[in-house]
Amino acid sequence: MTSISNLKFKDEFDKILALFILHGGLFLCAKVYEFIRYEFSLLSFVGFIIWFIYYRFFYRMVRFLYYSFWTMAGVTIFAIITDMYSSLQKYEDISLFYFYFLSMAAIFAVIYFLYSPIFYPNVSWWEYDFRYRNDIVTKVKVKDEDEGEGRLVDLRRGNGGLSFFGKLEVGDKVILRPEYNELDKAFKVEIMSKRQHSIGRPYTYGLKFHFDSIEEKKDFVKFQKFWQFERKHKKLSKFKNGNT
């Protein structure tokens, strides 16, 4: 679990939470409007209560960055699409449609901002054969300490996810040297978030890459291409070898 105190940019995360509250408010307002005008019944009232409870859990998934957020987001989007269709085909009410449409836009904005290794690093815990895991072994150096070994488990949108048993703090500056990097380059990163999925497993850190020159940025772009090639190669190798 990643709590707010373990995120460096709390203000930005608060804005995401506010956007989620806007989404939930629009959706529930649409349900109230639909209940009062079209579905004034005990069954519809019970349905509204269920949705209200659902959103309390949904908010908790976002607040504490549980991975269940993605499942609930999928369910919510499906429900909104269904309601948008009903608002036009069943009720022929454009105002109700706009409520649902704006709610849909807000949840997609939340998804866009949260789709980052800083918030939700993509760790392939289910893949026990390390030959096919979507990660790369990397050396990790903090200040003047000795190098440790971790795994770069995610690389998206200029950010990364690091699986590492060493205990780092949010705000620490770290040097990464991926072992499979054919360019043999080191990258400067900053710890932006920290979570531990369960006792006995390594910490997963959200990383932000920093560049002091255009050349460092170019090296990172080359490494991203190498990362993408490695992922595709591992998937193809697993398929050819008949592993599931």
Image (cartoon, rainbow, N blue to C red):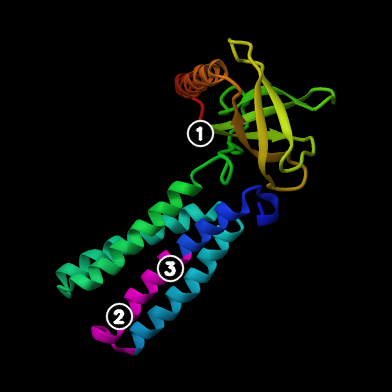
Q: Which mark is residue 33?
A: 2
The answer to whether 2 appears left or right of 29 in the picture is: right
Q: Which mark is residue 31?
A: none
Determine the CA span between mark 1 and mark 3. 28 Å
Residue 103: percent from left, percent from top: 35, 63
Residue 12: percent from left, percent from top: 55, 52
Q: Which residue is mark 1?
A: 156
The answer to whether residue 143 shows anywhere in this view is yes
- The structure residue drawn at horizontal position 18% and vertical position 74%, both measured from the top left corner, is 93
Q: Which residue is mark 3?
A: 24
Rendered position, 65 above or below 26: above
Give the mark nearer the N terminus: 1 vs 3. 3
Give the mark nearer the N terminus: 3 vs 2. 3
- The structure residue drawn at horizontal position 31% and vertical position 89%, both measured from the top left corner, is 41
- Whether the residues at callouts 1 and 3 have beta carbons within 8 Å, the answer is no
Badge 2 amino acid: Tyr
- Magenta residues span 21-41
Q: Secondary structure at mark 3?
A: helix
Q: Residues within 10 Å of mark 2 (few under 14, many from 20)?
A: some
Q: Secondary structure at mark 2?
A: helix
Determine the CA span between mark 3 and mark 2. 14 Å
Q: Main secondary structure of the magenta part?
A: helix
Q: Secondary structure at mark 1?
A: strand
Residue 66: percent from left, percent from top: 58, 54
Q: Residues within 10 Å of mark 1 (few under 14, many from 20)?
A: some
Most foreground residue, 220 or 51: 220
Asked if the stretch drawn in magenta spans residue 236, the answer is no
| Residue 130 image-quadrant placement | top right
Rendered position, 194 above or below 187: below
Determine the CA span between mark 2 and mark 1. 40 Å
The answer to whether residue 66 shows anywhere in this view is no
